[in-house]
Amino acid sequence: MLRNPGARSFVFVILALYCAAGYAQGKGEETYKAHCQSCHGSSGMADTGPGRVTKTLPVTAPELKSRTLAEMINYTRDGKDRMRGFEGKLTDEEIKASVMYFRSLIR
Ligand code: HEC
């Protein structure tokens, strides 16, 4: 089956995509744990001391479901309510990856 060069590059592309996705997921999770979890909580429920003090919304809040990825990236970069923006503290890539991880917790 792999004698056909087309099939070989197809397999390669799938593998490369798979690794890239895994990398983004790992980075998002890592950044989230280091910079976001203290308020947003490990499962996104904001069930932490700072989460309660800052009135962070849990991932079950209906308003979170209606937000787009771009809106959430802007909030995280510029700040929202009692959350200070992460501009200058995290790279755009880290902000995006951690927001994507946060969004994966929404239910
Ligand atoms: C000091 C506590 C704190 C930290 C740390 C924190 N947040 Fe927040 N976050 C908040 C608060 C408070 C809000 C505003 C209330 C809300 O929307 O949950 C908020 C809002 C948000 C929102 C908007 C949710 C919405 O209303 O649509 C996103 C997205 C978000 N945070 C992601 C992150 C990410 C990603 C990180 C880490 C890079 C992070 N937060 C770190 C407290 C925090």
Image (tube, rainbow, N blue to C red):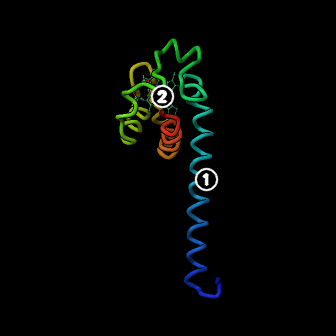
Q: What element carries label 1?
A: helix
Residue at 39% of width from left, 33% of height from top?
65
The front one of 6 and 98 is 6
Residue 3, horizontal then vertical, whole percent: 64, 88
49 left or right, relative to 99 = right
Find residue 47 and report its horizontal and vertical position in percent: 57, 19
Q: Label 1 amino acid?
A: Gly
Q: Regarding mark 2 in the picture, which secondary structure is present there?
A: loop
At label 2, the amino acid type is: Val
Q: Gap between marks 2 and 1, in whole Å?
A: 23 Å
Q: Which mark is residue 4?
A: none
Label 2, residues with CA under 10 Å away: few <14, some 14-19, many ≥20: many
The residue at which mark 1 appears reads as 22
- The answer to which of 87 and 60 lies nearer the viewer is 60
Taking the spot 45% from the left edge, 23% from the top edge, the residue there is 83
The location of residue 72, given as percent across then percent down, is: 40, 36
Give the image quarter of residue 81.
Answer: top left
Which callout, 2 or 1, points at the residue further toward the start of the chain? Answer: 1
Q: Residue at x 65, y 83 (%)?
A: 2
Q: Residue tagged by mark 2?
A: 59
**Residue at figure coordinates x 43%, y 18% from the top left:** 82
